[in-house]
Image (cartoon, rainbow, N blue to C red):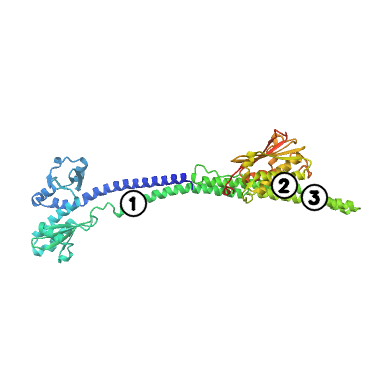
Amino acid sequence: MPLKFFLKLYARLIGLTFLVLLLCAALFTGINSVRSQFWNERFPEPLMRWLVDAPAPFLQYHWLQPLYDFQVSAPGDLSLSSVTLERLGYDQVVARNSSIGQQVLVQDADGSVLSLRFRDTYRDVTEAISLIVRQHLDQAGPGGLDERVAWLEEAFRVSLSRVASLDSVPDSEVLERVSERGLSLYQQNAREPASVLIRLEDGSLVNLTMPKPFDPWAWPVVLLLAVVSGGILALVLYLALRAVDNNLRAVESVAVRIARGEMGARVDAGDSKLVSRLAAAFNGMAEHIQRLVGVQREMIHAVSHELRTPVARIRFGVQMIEGASTPEALHKQLDGIDGDIQELDELIDEILTYARLEQGGPVFALQEVSVTDIVRQVVGEQQLIRPNLTIVARIDDESERWGVSDVEPRYIHRAIQNLVGNAGRYANGTVEVCCHFDEDNCRVDVEDDGPGIPEEDWEKVFTAFARLDDSRTRTSGGYGLGLSIVRRILYWHGGQAFVSRSDALGGARFSLVWPRKKPVDAIV
């Protein structure tokens, strides 16, 4: 995987995670602001209802005033908003923020507004209820305590229980505070309900348990955040996978079309970076298959044509053998048949070599070999075959210095041999093989003094079974595969073959160019 693509994908993942966290934080804050406001009004509601229903609460519970700023005021004295006044008129408990804590309001039957101010709503309301409970339990007679407990539990929505054994008290510090103040609030942790141990005037202990405090991480909130974040991630994943799926379906569709014979079908990757490499590889494969199919069709057509001539001559020779009247005539016909069979063998070898190179190339075993030695070897072999021609190798000192190259010796020998043999067929008297090597590249030029090749046919000569004349003889026509084999050999060496005009001899100049050093793993 490319580093740039990985970093881009990683950055998008980090950005998506940040956005999800930001959205969850905003959602968490917004939901809990509403929940907190609702809780700040509903939690002290039993206490406020008790005070509204009590006769002369300001006198009866006068000790609330210094503790919680207990006030009984007219609505106009508090500068209340129209919404707050309307809610108070509907007999609702209203909580509003102030500079020193939450102010909780409720309206009584006379239209007066009762207000308490809490710095810590949960602890202050718990302590206020505990003080009221202690006052009323102290006022109850011995026989009416249980009835009073049930009454207070229902009114304040709390749980009251007598402490029969000190083993149920959490620790000694709670008892010390009870002995000092008459009550002690204790809590296991911030999310658990608070309890208050109350000592009555007769010395008995009562335990008051409050409802749970406000929990910002209540399970509905956590579930909502999980659903929202999971939904966003699922949506993003769906959109990403849908794009990938569409591209893969496009590749699948093109593969089906190619299987049906539409060899020109190609994949359009569009803007997708994720599938672009697959599309490029698939299109490259499709082009290679299309070229191979085309080459196969051309080969079948050309081979059937090329085989027809020697087979016809063999058939004719066999017929002539039947009518041969002398040993000399019989020997002549047998020699002709033997030559035709040799021609068939050479043609089959050329066809197999070309097919092997076209269908993906041979397994090259690159070796450090002196190309100048190969050139001299080819020149020497061709000079023996064509003694009537002058075939020379021109290698300067610089080329000799850089003559060692990473090549497959057998195939480079075959390429140079094909060019020299081709030049020898058309040369009038001279063929020159010139080497131009440097630190990076190797170049071999094969020039002749023949008629040359028209410029418009320079590419045509490298086409399989292509010939620029109508000759079908063994001496001049060839099979039309030699130059195609040369070009494919150079292709698998990472180079190229091309033709031009020789400035020195006036005929054709075929050139081979390839990199002098090439890693073995680059050959695929």
Q: Is residue 62 left or right of residue 219?
A: left
Tell whether label 3 touches label 1 (CB within 8 Å): no
Callout 2: SS: helix
Q: Position of residue 514 (x, y in %)?
A: 62, 42
Does dot 1 land on a helix, a strand or a loop?
Answer: helix
Separation of disc 2 and disc 1 at Cα? Answer: 72 Å
Q: CA distance from mark 1 to mark 3?
A: 88 Å
Q: Is residue 489 above or below residue 212?
A: above
| Mark 3, other Cα within 10 Å: few <14 / some 14–19 / many ≥20 | many
Mark 3 element type: helix
- Residue 136 visible, this angle: yes
Q: Residue at x 14, y 56 (%)?
A: 130
* Left or right: residue 445 compared with residue 278: right
Task: List the residue tagged with mark 3.
Answer: 340
Q: Which residue is mark 1?
A: 224
At x 35%, y 52%, the residue is 226
Q: Position of residue 181 (x, y in %)?
A: 11, 56
| Residue 480 appearing in the image | no
Q: Nearer the viewer, residue 187 or 511?
A: 511
Name of the residue lying farthest toward the right: 325
Residue type for callout 2 = His
Q: Earlier in the sequence, mark 2 or mark 1?
A: 1
